[in-house]
Image (cartoon, grey):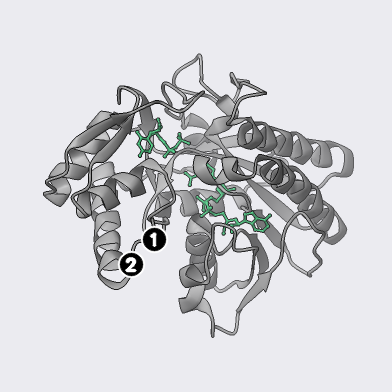
Amino acid sequence: MKRILVTGGAGFIGSHLCERLLAQGCDVVCLDNFFTGSKQNIIHLIGNNYFELVRHDVTDPYKAEVDEIYNLACPASPIHYQYNAIKTVKTSVMGAINMLGLAKRLNAKILQASTSEVYGDPTIHPQVESYWGNVNPIGERACYDEGKRLAETLFMSYNRQNHVKTKIIRIFNTYGPRMMPNDGRVVSNFIVQALTNKPITIYGSGEQTRSFQYVDDLVEGMIRVMSTPDSFTSPVNIGNPGEFTIKQLADKVISMTGSHSKIEYKPLPSDDPVKRRPDISLAQSELGWNPTVNLEQGLAKTIAYFEDYLKHNKLEF
Ligand code: NAD
Ligand code: UDP
């Protein structure tokens, strides 16, 4: 039985990953400091003898005997990662050092949840893994973008210098059930606004684009990357190449929910990337991976989740 550590396991993506690993017969340690994650996300797993929940902060060293580590601990939504920018850098960088140190001691495989944000506001489109990016190192997004870039540097350095078995995935915008309703990310914001008939807040003109991937596709990609041969260390884009403007997303959510919400335009946050779409040729050729859930199918599942959530919970914002 494989023993697996998932840092950030009580978060949106982490909770889906823990669920999937348990279903595959793994023994899972879920580590989280509950900054943006919650026990609610993994409460259905508590009681499973092969699931362990540990309250811990990755900026402090941690010891456990495991075979694989998925390092997801880091706030992902701009409002949360900018709330305490210094802590975000520490989480990315010290978290990576602590987890890589653990992987080195255990001779374990370790996968880093990196991000399309390493490409910044990209000057090539779609983004390929060989593109070095266009990141403002002193902007408001830098704590996240540069933190994740440095984590990639650390992963490659531990691989070259200490032969740690490292994997890096660059995750593009992911959505699905268990996103926090007040998380600030566009899909959850629009769905909650539409379901409560509140104005849909479009930042800027709404002409900026994103490519949205459903969480189950991402989890499948993560597991496939982890099982690549040890010699495979290249970062891999994991995302859905379907590209939509934010205005198109707003219109889709309004029509799928039958909402009476009107659109309200708000200022564009600084350094907001103009366009984003993954080139997934590497994931296709190396992993045989392709996304299987299109935007309408994924939105339908996510809308159903939030409808149910709003029936049973009070919104706290
Ligand atoms: P999330 O905020 O729901 O999950 C992050 C989890 O990490 C939370 O449970 C949080 O409490 C935990 N955490 C934060 N700081 C920690 C610390 N110092 N010590 C221990 N735990 C800590 O976000 P998510 O969307 O599930 O993202 C998971 C990972 O995937 C993150 O590393 C994020 O950067 C990456 N990612 C996500 C997306 C996306 O679209 N969701 C895109 C690119 C990359
Ligand atoms: N966005 C928006 N309205 C919102 C939330 C976000 O128009 O209520 C925009 C945001 O400015 C960005 C895009 O949607 O252009 C995606 O934002 P998100 O925070 O989800 O992810 P990221 O910018 O990190 O890709």
Residue drawn where x is 54% and y is 66% of the image: 18
Residues packed near mark 1 inside 10 Å, few (<14), some (14 to 19) or many (20 plus):
few
In this rendering, is residue 65 above or below 170?
A: below
As drawn, the label of residue 314 is: 2
Q: Residue at x 66, y 37 (%)?
A: 148
Amino acid under label 1? Glu
Between 309 and 313, the residue placed more toward the observer is 313
Residue 140, image x, y percentages: 59, 30
In the visual, does 48 lie left or right of 158? left
- Image position, residue 35 (x, y; %): 59, 58
Could you tell me if residue 259 is visible in this image?
A: yes
> Could you say which disc has been placed on residue 316 in the image?
1
**Circle 2: is it few (<14), some (14-19), or many (20+) Cα within 10 Å?**
few
User: If the picture is divided into quarters, which one holds ligand 2?
Assistant: top left
Which quarter of the rendered picture does the C terminus lie within?
A: bottom left
| Residue at the front extreme, as displayed | 317
